[in-house]
Image: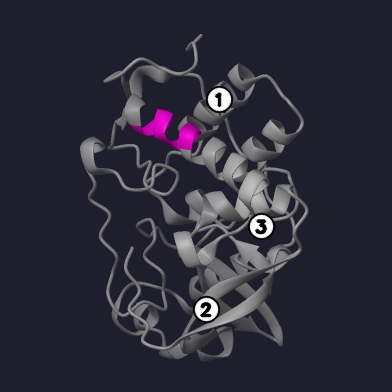
Amino acid sequence: MSLNYQKIRIESIPIKDCRHFRGHRYGLFSNHIYEDYVYGLSKNTPIETLRLQFIKRLLGMRSNDFGKTLGMALINKYSNWDYPWNMYKTKVEFSPSNNPDIVCHTALSHEILMSHINREFKWLENAYDSIKNQGYLPEKYEYITVLKLVSHQKNSFIVLDGNHRLSALAVLGETHVKMKVLSKIFLKDTLSFLWFGFLFRNYTLVDSKAIFSRYFWEINPDISEADDFSSIIVDESPLVRLL
């Protein structure tokens, strides 16, 4: 999901103002697929319980409809990650073997590799252990990168890279984190009539503003769960027993 911005700067960003691609707000420890997992680790929740819940949530979140993916009702149907402010329509055509972000790309037409699910467990657990023991080391592991949204003097930040680490930082009690802010443009809902999705694709103005506003929601909607594991390709041994 490439976003080509030229200017960047380092800022201390409130974690509570950050959102995952799917709109999940950080710092609530509720209905956030990454943060809830790490929070469970911090509370010594049995690892089998955390892993099984993660898989069920992953399967319950599968959708080809961007509105449903974001947990909201829209007038028209749009493809996942086709943000109305982007110049070009984002094409998400990942096969199971090269799926780069299993949480963002779980369309119903795609199967999921068990190896990629296992990889998510390891990333989340390693991020928590590493930051708990060593702290946040952006000079070594790169800064968390965000896109800034501005609406009525309020800011929201979509986390483009570093969601695993930000989950760990939130759980470990940090309130502000130094991040890399992409700043070629500041997106404002008052300019939505100039967005490419409205001008050149099938976006309505109402839907354009609604998707923008989605990243300012204060509460995370409930995450659906599913226990039909038939879409999982077991290419390596699961790290959790699938019931």
Q: Quadrant of residue 62?
A: top left
The answer to which of marks 3 and 2 sits earlier in the sequence is 3
Q: Nearer the viewer, residue 82 or 160?
A: 160
Relative horizontal placement of residue 4, taking residue 10 as reference (left or right): left
**Residue located at (66% from left, 57% from top):** 25
The residue under label 1 is which amino acid type? Answer: Arg
Magenta portion: prevailing SS class: helix
Disc nearest the viewer among 3 and 1: 1
Q: Which residue is mark 3?
A: 25
Disc nearest the viewer among 3 and 2: 2
- From the top left corner, tell me how far across and down residue 39 is, in percent: 71, 39
The residue segment tinted magenta is 116-122
Q: Is residue 122 above or below residue 189?
A: above
Q: Which residue is mark 1?
A: 51
**Residue located at (24% from left, 47% from top):** 94
The kind of secondary structure element at disc 1 is helix
Q: Nearer the viewer, residue 43 or 205?
A: 43
- From the top left corner, tell me how far across and down residue 64 is, in percent: 37, 47
Question: Residues under labels 3 and 2: Cα distance?
Answer: 17 Å
Q: Is residue 80 above or below residue 5?
A: above
**Residue located at (54% from left, 49% from top):** 164
The kind of secondary structure element at disc 2 is strand
Q: Which residue is mark 2?
A: 181
